[in-house]
Amino acid sequence: MTILQPVILSGGSGTRLWPLSRRAYPKQFLSLVDDTSLLQATAARLDGLDDGIEVAPPLIVCNDAHRFLVAEQLRSSGHAAGSILLEPVGRNTAPALTLAALDTASDDPVLIVMPADHVVKDVAAFTRAVNAGLPHAAAGKVVTFGIVPNAPETGFGYIRAGASVDPQTLALDAFVEKPDLETAERYLASGDYLWNSGIFVLRASRWLALIERMRPDILAAVREAYDNGQRDLDFYRVDEHAFAASPSDSIDYAVMEPLSRERGECLVVPLDAGWSDIGAWAALWDVSPRDDAGNACHGDVIAVDAGDNLLHAHHRMVAAVGVRDLIVVETSDAILVADKAHAQDVKRVTERLDAEGRCESEFHRRVHRPWGSYEGMDIGERFQVKRLSVNPGASLSMQMHHHRAEHWIVVSGTARVTCDDNTFLLTENQSTYIPIGTRHRLENPGTIALEIIEVQSGSYLGEDDIVRYEDVYNRADSGA
């Protein structure tokens, strides 16, 4: 029986989908086209493979800050991860895949390498393509999927396909850089070119042999990082110093492009499955259901004499009157209005926010933590009000603050509170006071979510004013 090991690369930040995508909660964790997140949809994409193929639990490569989001989203969707490998710094996709190959080397499964933030609308077509490519990968070939183009797209790299190997598989002649419009139109007319999907199928041992031959510097650094790593709860944390020493390079540049010049080593399966990498808001409009006027609407939206717009409302009603080809995205703390033709320029907004030292490129108003989340409600001189939601059975760290006191009021659920040596329960409408310098912990011993209003007061209210004594999540970073 063939063992197929999904490898999901979840390191992206999705800055072109601001303000919905933020670095602390990027696009792979968002539900953009249906009720599941892009990460959850990626994990579920292989559920329909042929009999005789054993699909292992997914292996995820992600950055340290997203580890609990990854684990919780997969658990809640019924696709709990087999391994979650943590990258201490981003080094692009070639080192990430090398980590995954090292982690699975003893079993040498066939790896299917998928970005976490793509959309595939026709999952049946995707699984047919995987079924077609899998026997070739099991036999030692490197297989990728080429998206059948429907437009002269200048934002994608291309694959030039060669002769047929079987009814569903072609030889891969070359990888081609992103073209200008005239060249893209020529590619489309020829019928010989496909978009590069960034999805690959190959054995773990095959990748390790290729990266050793073509980029031994990457393999050496990543192997040292993996060998010197350590288990942390459900995660594997590689050595930061060694991994940071790895060159940053993509799978395409490090291996696939030079390998494609070796005739017969690379194959491509054409894929026509409603694929999109959702690289910008205009791409989401392309794959979204639209009304008779061409508007793709989400949430509480009213469109009057408006057409071909992407209108996303998340906290308030959005009304569009007499406008066309606009992107309007409303969140609790920011509103984006952009011409669809300038969708790629949204990244410049996040660059401006970073340059001005603002937090809106990093966090939403609601900030996720492994125990639940908190949301800022009001802030002023020497005070701040937050709403905390603590998951059943979850616990904040035992901690202390040097510069602020806190009042906790229970809105719903039951709280177990520890203050120095005292532990007691609070129920709805009850409250307590945590003085400056007091060791304290908040827990939810119940079976429903615990909702707390927290009022902070003091001379400094930053999230880095936390001294941790105990933490069930082994966090060393700042934050509740």
Image: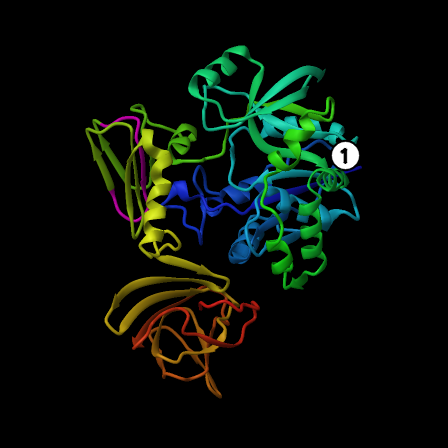
Up-down relation of residue 257 to residue 350 (above or below) = above
Front-most of residues 304 and 275: 275
- Residue drawn at x 37%, y 42% is 347
Indicate the quadrant containing the N terminus: top left, top right, bottom left or bottom right: top right
- Residue drawn at x 29%, y 69% is 384
Question: In the image, residue 315 lies at what x, y percent?
Answer: 30, 49
Residue 117 in sight in this render: yes
- Residue drawn at x 70%, y 56% is 224
Q: Residue furthest top?
A: 190
Up-down relation of residue 37 to residue 256 (above or below) = below
Q: Please tell me how crowded label 1 is: few (under 14), some (14-19), or many (20+) other residues with Cα within 10 Å.
A: few
Q: Which secondary structure dominates the residues rendered in magenta?
A: loop
Q: Which residue is mark 1?
A: 52
> Is residue 315 located in the magenta-colored stretch of the structure?
yes
- Residue drawn at x 70%, y 39% is 111
**Figure quadrant of residue 358:** bottom left
Mark 1, secondary structure of its residue: loop
Question: How many callouts does the rendering have?
Answer: 1
Indicate the quadrant containing the C terminus: top left, top right, bottom left or bottom right: bottom left
Front-most of residues 327 and 89: 89
Question: In the image, residue 266 lies at what x, y percent?
Answer: 70, 26
Front-most of residues 271 and 179: 179
**Over which residues does the magenta segment extend?**
306-317
**Figure quadrant of residue 115:** top right
